[in-house]
């Protein structure tokens, strides 16, 4: 069985994340969406809430599982028997950083990284940008899946524009 992990913080999950996850699900038999637990950062949503949102928006993808991990991604991959990391790339700046991470991960454990060029429709998109725009009442309805929009607007106490 061909398995991969799509790691991230997903705070919140965006349409760009979902695009990469859907594309990975067509290439691999099993896709694990790995939510990073970072105790040094306080997110807008808890890890459990992010996992719930991811489960909801990937429910139609029969080969996608949602999990969380702490520490090094390569340790998680080794423990779970996952040989490939799938990452979306938005811009050249992403490539510079992700290439270094890919090479380090491979050096540490032999884990391979597959880079997926982000759909141009989402090339500017990041969770932090979505949070910032939504915090100020901006319309993010085209940037996140409907269930995420509802949770986001409820959390920020702003009415959804959909």
Image: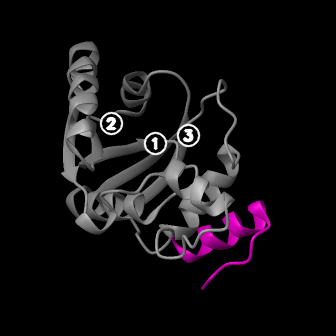
The image position of residue 25, as x and y in percent, is 30, 61
Which residue bears the numbered disc 1? 8
Q: In this view, does 26 lie to the left or right of 9?
A: left
Q: Cα distance, mark 1 to mark 2? A: 16 Å
User: Is residue 6 covered in magenta?
Assistant: no
- At label 3, counting other C-alpha atoms closer than 10 Å, the crowd grade (few under 14, some 14-19, many 20 or more) is some
Q: Which mark is residue 143?
A: none
Prevailing secondary structure of the magenta residues: helix
Q: Residues within 10 Å of mark 2 (few under 14, many from 20)?
A: many
Q: What stretch is highlighted in magenta?
A: 145-162
Front-most of 129 and 104? 129
Spatial separation of the CA atoms under disc 3 and disc 2: 14 Å
Q: Nearer the viewer, residue 36 or 2?
A: 36
Q: Position of residue 11 (x, y in %)?
A: 58, 49
Q: How many labels does the image show?
A: 3
Where 15 sits versus 131, above or below?
Answer: below
Foreground label between 1 and 2: 1
Q: In which quarter of the image is residue 121?
A: bottom left
Q: Mark 2 points at which residue?
A: 82
- Give the answer, above or below, for where 39 lies relative to 45: above
Could you give the CA–CA distance between mark 3 and mark 1, rounded to whole angstroms?
Answer: 9 Å
| Viewer-closest of 70 and 95 | 95
Residue with the most extreme top position: 108
Image quarter of the C terminus:
bottom right
Return the disc, 1 or 2, that comes first in the chain's sequence: 1
> Label 1 crowding class (10 Å Cα cut-off): few <14, some 14-19, many 20+?
some
Q: Mark 3 points at which residue?
A: 68
């Amino acid at each position: 069985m061909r398995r991969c992990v799509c790691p991230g913080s997903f705070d919140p999950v965006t349409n760009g994340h979902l695009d990469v996850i859907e594309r990975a699900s067509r290439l691999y038999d099993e896709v694990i969406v790995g939510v990073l637990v970072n105790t040094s950062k306080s997110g807008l949503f808890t890890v459990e809430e992010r996992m719930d949102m991811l489960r909801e928006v990937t429910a139609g993808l029969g080969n996608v599982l949602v999990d969380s991990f702490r520490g090094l991604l390569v340790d998680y991959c080794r423990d779970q028997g996952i040989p490939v990391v799938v990452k979306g790339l938005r811009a050249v700046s992403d490539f510079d950083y992700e290439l270094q991470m890919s090479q380090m991960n491979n050096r540490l454990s032999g884990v391979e990284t597959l880079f997926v060029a982000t759909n141009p429709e989402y090339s500017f998109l990041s969770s932090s940008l979505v949070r910032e725009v939504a915090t100020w009442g901006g319309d993010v309805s085209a940037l996140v899946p409907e269930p995420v929009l509802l949770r986001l607007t409820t959390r920020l106490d702003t009415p959804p524009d959909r």
